[in-house]
């Protein structure tokens, strides 16, 4: 979309109305289809990295991949606690055998609301279908050995029905990463300018007042860019976190 900057704020004629129009334009641009597409790509990138790190760990721990779908018969039964309770039961069953549970899930809605899951289980461990039906009493379950983790991961990461999900529902979740995996996943979503400043192996988190803080050194990094309706542009002068 092309924006005529002169129609928004003409030099020397900054009025209350023009400021309001400018603010509305920024808001519309920030929530445009392009911005939505970037968020979807960021989610896909993160989920793909999660699965990549779990695959690496699985080779060391001798785990096998299992694909699973948990479907709701009735949408009105949905609760965000259900997936946590299901995984908690499976995790406890594996813990008694001395195993952890790496997993990833995505919530999706087609004709029915359902979860797609990727589970990493010990070789030789067989899921009890009778127990699964008790652990998931809200509809049907589908389980199959995952022959292609990459293909199942791509299928999970479609993220095509976000607008159809129940209000407040989480889109995806994961767990069971080792420390190297957690670090890799935390860095994959960082902006490029920040990755160039933060050494490999260092973690960062957002500052309440803006910018990012290096947890290891305490150094605060501020973006060299500022947002405009026409895209991100480099700030003039030293970068600040305003």
Image: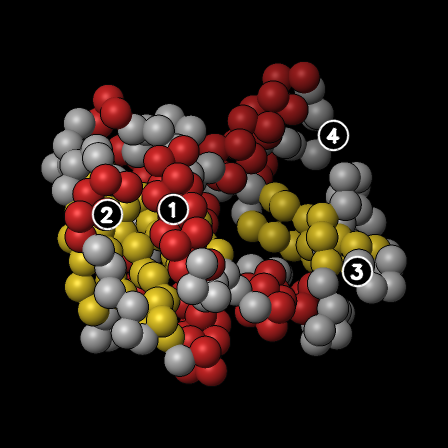
How far separated are the C-alphas under marks 3 and 4? 42 Å
- The residue that disc 4 covers is 12
Taking the image as shown, residue 61 lies to the left or right of residue 228, namely: left
Find disc 3 in the rendering and name its residue.
Answer: 214
User: Residue farthest to the top?
Assistant: 16
Q: Earlier in the sequence, mark 3 or mark 4?
A: 4
Closer to the eye: label 3 or 1: 1
* Quadrant assignment, res 6: top right
Which mark lies nearer to you, 4 or 1? Answer: 1
Count the marks. Answer: 4
Q: Quadrant of residue 81?
A: top left
Instruction: Please provide percent x and percent y for residue 214.
Output: 79, 60
How far separated are the C-alphas under marks 2 and 4? 72 Å
Q: Residue at x 46, y 59 (%)?
A: 95
Q: Which residue is mark 1?
A: 89
Q: Residue at x 53, y 32 (%)?
A: 27
Q: Mark 2 and 1 residues: CB-CB less than 8 Å, in contact?
A: yes
Residue visible at 72% across and 58% down in the picture: 204
Of all residues shown, which one is farthest toward the front? 96
Secondary structure state at the residue bearing disc 1: helix
Query: Looking at the image, is mark 2 or mark 4 nearer the viewer?
Result: 2
In the image: residue 175, left or right of residue 240: left
Q: Quadrant of the C terminus?
A: top right
- Mark-to-mark CA distance, 3 and 2: 45 Å
Where residue 97 sits: x, y (%)? Answer: 43, 64
Query: Marks 3 and 1, Cα distance to the nearest angstrom?
Result: 37 Å
Pointer 2 residue: 131
Q: Position of residue 86 (x, y in %)?
A: 35, 43
> Would you say 226 lies left or right of 158 here?
right
Q: Is residue 108 above or below residue 138?
A: below
């Amino acid at each position: 979309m092309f924006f005529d900057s002169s129609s928004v704020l003409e030099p020397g004629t900054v009025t209350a109305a023009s400021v309001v129009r400018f603010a509305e334009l920024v808001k519309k641009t920030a929530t445009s289809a392009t911005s939505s597409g970037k968020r979807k790509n960021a989610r896909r990138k993160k989920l793909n990295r999660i699965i990549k790190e779990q695959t690496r760990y699985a080779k060391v721990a001798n785990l096998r991949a299992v694909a699973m779908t948990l479907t709701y018969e009735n949408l009105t039964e949905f609760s965000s606690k259900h997936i946590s309770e299901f995984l908690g039961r499976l995790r406890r069953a594996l813990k008694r055998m001395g195993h952890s549970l790496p997993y990833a899930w995505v919530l999706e809605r087609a004709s029915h609301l359902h979860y797609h899951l990727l589970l990493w289980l010990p070789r030789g461990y067989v899921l009890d279908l009778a127990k699964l039906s008790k652990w998931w009493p809200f509809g049907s379950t589908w389980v199959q050995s995952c022959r292609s983790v990459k293909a199942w991961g791509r299928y999970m990461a479609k993220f095509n029905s976000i607008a159809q999900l129940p209000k407040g529902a989480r889109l995806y979740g994961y767990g069971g990463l080792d420390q190297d995996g957690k670090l890799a996943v935390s860095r994959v979503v960082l902006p490029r300018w920040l990755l160039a400043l933060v050494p490999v192996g260092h973690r960062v988190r957002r500052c309440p007042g803006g910018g990012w803080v290096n947890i290891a050194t305490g150094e605060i990094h501020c973006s060299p860019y500022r947002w405009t309706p026409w895209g991100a542009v480099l700030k003039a002068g030293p970068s600040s976190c305003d």
